[in-house]
Amino acid sequence: MVKVKTSIEEIEQYRPGETVEETAHRVELDVSEIIKLASNENVLGPSPAAVQAIISGVDRVNTYPTVDAIHLRSEILSHLGEGFLIENIVCGNGSDGVIEALVHLFIEDGDEAIIPIPTFSFYELVVRMHGGRPVFLTRDSEFGFSSDEIISKVTDRTKLIFIASPNNPTGNSIDEQILRDLLESLDAMIILDEAYIEFSSKPSLNRLVLEYDNLAVIHTFSKAYGLAGMRVGYGVIPGWLFPYYTRATPPFAVNTLAEAAAIAALRDEKHLERTRKMVEDGKKLLTAEIPFKVYPGDANFVLVDTSPLTSREVSEALKSMGIIVRDCAGFRGMGDSFIRITIGRREDNRRVVEALRKIKNRVI
């Protein structure tokens, strides 16, 4: 019998959370009564300009997209600032696609990738998919780590280091000096995932790509730009890596409609500012009024310590009230007393606060 690769056989299948429809059926509420604040999507939706770009592009879907998303890469280049070249930008089918391409480039059977946990679970999954071995570093009580702690995990098989900044699900960001120390000390590629950087008051660290040849910075259009369903992301990489990246990826990784939507979204700065303002205001409200310890962080969500209740108890209680949040027990190294709440519209945030107050009052 033909067999698949052992590395694939051993991977635990990804299991997404309940849909709005599934939750509504289970808790016996109408779909319209359910609010989903579990996936860090932009509740304002995409830019109207992006929607129009999708509509306008429908009559072109009979032809292939541009090779290597050249139009989108050119638009991104115009936003990056001085010093960057078109060869510093690559695009993919979501930021996941860019990350997988980089893993494909560097990881061979038995190679290692260092992953500070808790963090985005895709890193572990994609390393295992390619026959690599994830090496985990548990973050401290405030979800940080030092450069020395990372360096202590390095072996002669270390090829990649994953750092999400802001980190998912904790929301904290890496200190620039720690990143510089790692870049200067290690002969390994560092993948810095800035999926949530648009929500942060801290600047992107894209510019460090011009200083170091072992850094790739990853971005997505799924979060701040509201295009999660279009699957488009990009990476800022050192120029030497570009010809290898194009050899390892399909030429049409970004479809025609996704490219058009992403270009329009980048150009609509007013919609991005509306999104940021909604997140900033919502974060203040949730941090001040949720009756549990809140970690506000730098992203479009807050992390909540539900102690003395478990995350499952709280997330299930919220579901019974029509509110879907992320139970963080599924994140390796997170424990069983944290939930993650996407920041929504003001009325959604108020509803979350009132629901958590009711849950907390049952315990007192």
Image: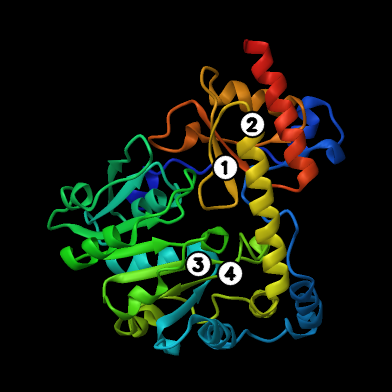
**Looking at this rendering, what residue extends furthest in the left direction?**
156
Q: Residues within 10 Å of mark 3 (few under 14, many from 20)?
A: many
Which one is closest to the eye, mark 4 or mark 3? 3
Q: Amino acid at mark 2?
A: Ile
Q: Residue 1 location, x and y as percent?
A: 38, 49
Q: Amino acid at mark 4?
A: Val
For disc 4, the marked residue is 232
Q: CA distance from mark 4 to mark 1?
A: 25 Å
Q: Residues within 10 Å of mark 4 (few under 14, many from 20)?
A: many
Q: Amino acid at mark 3?
A: His
Going from the N terminus, do you reach mark 3 or mark 2 first? 3
For disc 2, the marked residue is 290
The residue under the point 67% across, 80% down is 267
Secondary structure type for disc 3: strand
Residue contact between numbered discs 4 and 3, judged by CB atoms under 8 Å: no
Q: Left or right of 95: which side holds 129?
A: left
Q: Residue 313 location, x and y as percent?
A: 60, 20
Residue 222 picture quarter: bottom right
The circle drawn on residue 302 is 1
Going from the N terminus, do you reach mark 4 or mark 1 first? 4
Residue 3 seen in the current view: no
The circle drawn on residue 219 is 3
Q: Residue 234 location, x and y as percent?
A: 50, 72
